[in-house]
Image: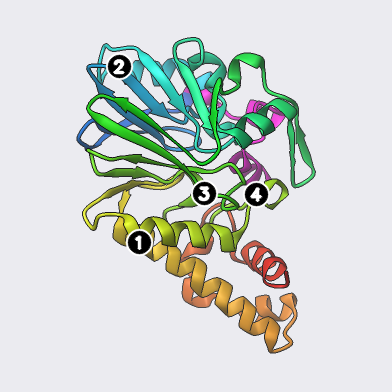
Amino acid sequence: MRKLIFVLASLTATSLFAQQDFSKVEIKVTKVAGTVYMLTGSGGNIGVSAGDDGIVIVDDQFAPLAPKIKEALKGITAKPVKYILNTHYHGDHTGGNEVFGKDGTIIAHENVRKRLAAGTTVNGNSTPPAAKDALPVITFNDRATLHVNGEDIRAVHFPHGHTDGDSVIYFTQSNVVHMGDDFFNGFYPFVDVDNGGSVKGMLAGVDKVLSTMPDDAKVIPGHGPLSDKAGLRAFAEVLRGTLGAVSQALAAGKTVDQMKAEKILAPWDSWGKGFIKTDRWIDLLASEAKK
């Protein structure tokens, strides 16, 4: 369980990742809409825009998977990778930076570069600074736009969600949104509170995206299957409902152990069958609700 949590938390190429057998990982390609594809393998879902101007990838999983990812991209187009957008700093989304950064320009929020360059600690586990070639060379504070492949690809910073450097990526013409790890489709999310993450902030960000997203938009989650606006709304309601249940229990004087024993999150039981189990989610919600 701890291994799964830390892999999801993305502590770059540590001994935890060395235990994974990447040779067995298959990179699968799904056409989403317009110029956009989704690649799945091990780690965060990759978004791809492919067109006459070349390839834009959103996140790049783990470094050992880079050759397989490149082969999958060749099945989409012979054009080269021109830009790499990172939705946040975790290694299952940026591990391939050092490889793909030799082909294209890495772009991310300034906090992504900051945390990659300095190294980080999550749940007491330290990650050393990333190699120079893995660092974003273009950073932004609020938003940035790439005008390629007939798309206005917009990266918008949402503070204090999964981390403090999250970006949601809008493929405007294709009507696709890549949420990064501000959306775990079908299970409770990992929230990196050691590096600026917040359940309340994540919910606020998701609500904001929902308020502006077209009803027929496709949504790429950071983890889980391809989704849509209804799926993202369901995730928001899980965040809202579970946070509310724990807050009410605290107000009634219940302890965390009592909440677990009474199974106060039973209505959302299926969401606790992923990386983050229900008891761990209660711990996080209680800690945040007390702030």
Vertical order, 39 against 225 (above or below): above
Mark 3–mark 2 distance (CA, rounded to whole Å): 27 Å
Q: Position of residue 256 (x, y in %)?
A: 72, 75
Lateral position of residue 143 relative to residue 253, left or right: left
Q: Which residue is mark 4?
A: 192
In this rendering, the label closer to the viewer, 2 or 4: 2
Overall secondary structure of the magenta section: helix
- Real-space CA distance between mark 2 and mark 1, rounded to the nearest whole angstrom: 31 Å
| Res. 102 in view | yes
Q: Is residue 107 left or right of residue 46?
A: right
Identify the amino acid type marked 2: Gly
Q: Amino acid at mark 3?
A: Phe
Instruction: Determine whether, in the image, residue 8 is placed left or right of residue 55.
Output: right
Do labels 3 and 4 touch, CB within 8 Å? Answer: no
For marks 2 and 1, the one nearer the N-term is: 2
Residue tagged 2:
54
Who comes first in sequence, dot 1 or dot 4? 4
Give the mark nearest the N terminus, 2 or 4: 2
Q: Nearer the viewer, residue 59 or 70?
A: 59
Q: Are marks 1 and 3 in contact (CB under 8 Å)?
A: no
Q: Which residues are magenta?
A: 1-23
**Are circles 2 and 4 on residues that touch, CB within 8 Å?**
no
Which of 285 and 271 lies nearest the eye of the viewer?
285
Quarter of the image holding residue 18? top right
**Could you tell me which quadrant the C terminus lies in?**
bottom right
Q: CA distance from mark 1 to mark 4?
A: 25 Å
First of labels 1, 3 by sequence position: 3
Residue 234 percent location from the top left of the image? 38, 65
Q: Note whether 123 is above or below 30 in the view shown.
A: below
